[in-house]
């Protein structure tokens, strides 16, 4: 099976924002746990750590775009989210800087229109190579 994997481009400002969030949430959870160790504080610190540390790092480390040439699929993963798109259902691809929430870690993006009025925005680091690999299917 031939699968090509493309990582998301990551804007420096977004990386710095995520790392600042991770540091601040880690400090907040540590301070909360350092005050009084109660079930309430432990639960709240766990939520802070998951939402402010684990989830952003998970998105940062797992945002990928897979082109499965054998199955003719584009598979997009980002944290717990996964999209499977039939490559033949893609109707257009255009460059965009739309900041809408999407599985893209950069504003240097591609908007993929597919199916009936569906779209997704991605940001492969190697945009040209991604488009070439997609066109081979």
Image: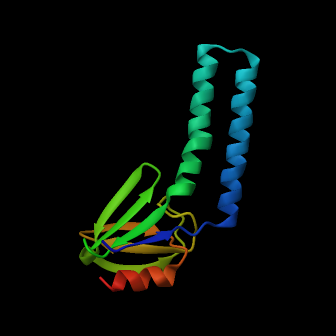
Residue 119: x %, y % from top left: 36, 67
Residue 3: x %, y % from top left: 36, 72
The structure residue drawn at horizontal position 54% and vertical position 49%, both measured from the top left corner, is 58
- Looking at the image, is 28 positioned above or below residue 60? above
The image quarter in which residue 114 lies: bottom left
Residue 27: x %, y % from top left: 74, 35
The image quarter in which residue 86 lies: bottom left
Instruction: Name the quarter where the C terminus is drawn.
Output: bottom left
Outermost residue on the front side: it is 1
The structure residue drawn at horizontal position 64% and vertical position 13%, both measured from the top left corner, is 38
| Side of 122 relative to 16 (left or right) | left
| Side of 137 relative to 20 (left or right) | left
The image quarter in which residue 43 lies: top right
Nearest the viewer among 84 and 111 is 84
What colour scheme does the image use? rainbow
- Looking at the image, is 124 positioned above or below residue 42? below
Nearest the viewer among 113 and 105 is 105
| Side of 28 relative to 135 (left or right) | right
Instruction: Name the quarter where the N terminus is drawn.
Output: bottom left
Residue 44: x %, y % from top left: 60, 25
The structure residue drawn at horizontal position 39% and vertical position 82%, both measured from the top left corner, is 133
Count of picture labels:
0
| Side of 133 relative to 36 (left or right) | left
């Amino acid at each position: 099976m031939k699968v090509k994997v493309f990582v998301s481009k990551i804007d420096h400002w977004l990386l710095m924002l995520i790392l600042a969030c991770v540091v601040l949430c880690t400090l907040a959870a540590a301070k909360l746990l350092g005050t009084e160790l109660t079930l309430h504080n432990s639960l709240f610190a766990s939520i802070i750590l998951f939402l402010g540390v684990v989830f952003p790092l998970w998105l940062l480390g797992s945002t990928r775009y897979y082109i499965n040439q054998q199955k003719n699929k584009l598979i997009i993963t980002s944290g717990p989210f996964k999209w499977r798109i039939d490559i033949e259902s893609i109707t257009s691809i255009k460059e965009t800087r739309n900041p809408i929430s999407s599985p893209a870690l950069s504003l240097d993006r591609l908007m993929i229109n597919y199916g009936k009025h569906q779209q997704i925005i991605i940001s492969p680091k190697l945009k040209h190579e991604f488009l070439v690999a997609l066109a081979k299917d």
